């Protein structure tokens, strides 16, 4: 997919199609975008025109530009443990949507997420981690509680529930709720399969 078609993805639907097409290229072993300096230089002049902002996990196995086969200038990426939100993350997404006119926000969880596992462990054992890691775990804990911490499938279910909770929070964000309500912006959730490389959208 060319940079020009990515730049043309100015609606939520077109932006989502562009992203998923990139994931199919990645899964099929036929990515078209290299990450060399010529690609960087090609978008160095002029303003950036990304078409999506992705919020994913810090997990080293989930590099967002790679799994969606995206090049320089096409997507904005934010990564925190289990895509946990804080004011800096929300403000960054508000900037991308409000100032850069990006029509799509995707929240991407993944299988075998260590941060979600920490939240499951915390609720099962009652042993809360120290430091700022406690904040991360606390943000994930409601999703674990909703699916049931003692359920044998608590982890995979909590991964999905936590994605959907993050999506709901962003859709209700002060500066995002208006554009979402009138259809200019969409916030979608998805899960990444570490083994196959496939991204699967979640129903709200
Ligand atoms: Zn993770």
Image (cartoon, helix red, strand yellow):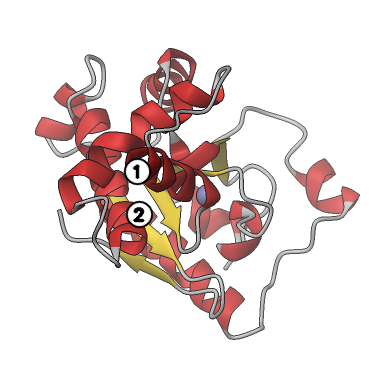
Look at the picture and state if 191 lies above or below 149: below
**Residue 98 is drawn in which quadrant?**
top left
Give the residue drawn at x 80%, y 44%: 40
> Residue 100 location, x and y as percent?
46, 26
Give the residue drawn at x 46%, y 71%: 21
Q: Which residue is mark 2?
A: 159
Secondary structure beneath disc 1?
Answer: strand
How many numbered badges does the structure rendering display? 2
- Which residue is the extreme one toward the left? 181
Mark positioned earlier in the residue sequence (1 or 2): 1
Question: Which numbered tag is attached to residue 104?
Answer: 1
- Residue 152 placement, left or right of 18: left
> Residue 150 location, x and y as percent?
25, 55
Along the line of sight, which residue is nearer the eye, 105 or 194? 194
- Residue 43 placement, left or right of 139: right
Along the line of sight, which residue is nearer the eye, 185 or 149? 149
> Residue 178 location, x and y as percent?
15, 23
Q: Which quadrant is home to the N terminus?
A: bottom right
């Amino acid at each position: 997919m060319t940079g020009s078609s990515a730049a043309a993805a100015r609606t939520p639907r077109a932006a989502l199609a562009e992203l998923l097409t990139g994931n199919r290229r990645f899964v099929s072993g036929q990515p078209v975008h290299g990450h060399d300096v010529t690609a960087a230089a090609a978008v160095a002049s002029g303003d950036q025109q990304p078409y999506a902002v992705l919020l994913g996990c810090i997990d080293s196995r989930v590099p967002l530009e790679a799994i969606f086969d995206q090049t320089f200038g096409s997507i904005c990426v934010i990564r925190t443990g289990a895509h946990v939100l804080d004011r800096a993350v929300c403000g960054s997404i508000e900037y991308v949507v409000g100032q850069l006119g990006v029509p799509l926000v995707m929240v991407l969880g993944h299988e075998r997420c260590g941060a979600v596992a920490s939240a499951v462990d915390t609720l099962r054992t009652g042993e809360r981690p120290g430091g700022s890691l406690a904040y991360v775990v606390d943000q994930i804990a409601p999703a674990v509680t909703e699916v049931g911490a003692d359920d044998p499938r608590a982890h995979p279910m909590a991964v999905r529930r936590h994605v959907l909770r993050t999506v709901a929070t962003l859709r209700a964000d002060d500066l995002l709720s208006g554009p979402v309500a009138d259809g200019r912006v969409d916030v979608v959730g998805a899960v990444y399969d570490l083994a196959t490389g496939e991204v699967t959208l979640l129903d709200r």
